[in-house]
Image (tube, rainbow, N blue to C red):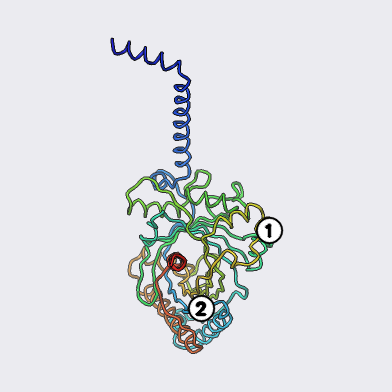
Amino acid sequence: MCGWFVSLILMSRLSRSPWFWVFLLILSLATYFFVFYSSWASREAFLIGDLVNPRETAFGTKARSEREFKVGIKDFNSGKTPLVVQTIRETLEKTIAGQSLLAPTLVGQPYRLRFDEEPFIFLDFYFDTENFDLDKANAAYRLRYRWKSTPDFVRFINGGRNRMDLPIRCELQCKFEREEHSDGFSVSREARFEFRDESQPFSILYPAPSSPWPFFDFLRIARKGAFEGQIMMPARDCARVLQRTLGVSQVNLKSHFAVLDIRTRFHVLIKTPWGSGPMPDDAFIVTFDNFWYSKRQRRLLEVDHHGGRRGRLRAINNVFREGGAEIEFEFERNVSSKLDEILSAEGSDRKVLQARDAFLKDLTTIKDATIRSLAARSIEAEGMNVSKIRQVSRRWDSVVSKIED
């Protein structure tokens, strides 16, 4: 009782001091901002526990196997692009017309070639934790934009907002469980969430957000892993990777690099019983990528926010550094997915297993022929297993080291 009485007297005396009320106000404001910041940080966090919750449905395209060779070109600069593209095309035409490939004999149909004459543009924002925990676990999480051509992209980034200037695609991707083999060959799984009416959960009744998908807004969506409260399948797969490797309930993701990819693509087609999707005859995709990277993403956000009215980029190299070039030889999912599905359901179906092996051997033959053709024109290329995010991280570290020295 005595202690309570003394406390009451002290409080009465303190309350007469103006400094007491100043202190109380500061304490109240500090408490309010702490609670507000905690709530805000939670809303911006990648909530692993929520994303992997099995009671919640995830939307998008389920992860499918991706098999590809990655071939890096040494000492590349953009001036070599026409020669590289010409070499790839001539090699493909000659190789698929030859007698050394296996799948045509197996299915009784020839390979055919279709190519995209004009390169198109990908702009990828790569996300990871501060310590690159996804990359350490052989996973990648990115938000991808696509433009039909380089001029379209340049006009957009400099303020063009006509229909032809806008990006034509926006999607979220997670690549994980990447297994690296020899000669640049790798096997991984990839899940997607596409912002278009033809993809889940969108429809005519629930239309997808339309282009241009503002950078700031959609980077925030990617960091959270959910769109309008709906979990996106790539976010769930990456959350599972982080849960398994870190054992935490949430992390903060940041976009470390923006990678600009100028891509020329060739399609190797063949009619088979296993075709699926909108282009069922696509067996292989061969892509030539001249890629650039940037750490100055704030500049991109500012340009997008102001519609290019401030700080126009005008030229790609104002914000991006050239990263290099590579060729990818991919066993296209339009054929490979059906083969995998049959083998998974029926076990070792001899004919299907023989077909899958034949396609992979043909892909190897095409890759080896392309490397030899490039070497004949004094362009050195070799298989490598280094993702773009690792390549640009190393290049950036090298740039920083030179500046510090």
Where, quadrant-wise, is the C terminus in this rendering? bottom left
Q: Residue at x 59, y 47 (%)?
A: 206
Q: Position of residue 395 (x, y in %)?
A: 45, 68
Q: Nearer the viewer, residue 8 or 47?
A: 8
Q: Where is mark 1, residue-wise?
A: 159
Q: Position of residue 140 (x, y in %)?
A: 43, 60
Left or right placement of residue 9 versus residue 255 in this view: left
Q: Residue at x 47, y 74 (%)?
A: 328
What number is the disc on residue 25? none
Q: Position of residue 325 (x, y in %)?
A: 50, 74
Q: Nearer the viewer, residue 276 or 234?
A: 234
Query: At numbered mark 2, what does the secondary structure look like: helix, strand or loop?
Result: loop
Q: Position of residue 18 (x, y in %)?
A: 48, 20
Q: Earlier in the sequence, mark 1 or mark 2?
A: 2
Looking at the picture, does residue 21 appear above or below residue 66?
above
Q: Where is mark 2, residue-wise?
A: 76
Q: Tell me the kind of residue under disc 1.
A: Gly
Q: Tell me the kind of residue under disc 2.
A: Phe
Looking at the picture, does residue 120 appear above or below residue 15?
below
> In 3D space, how far apart are the residues under numbered discs 1 and 2 (Cα atoms)?
31 Å
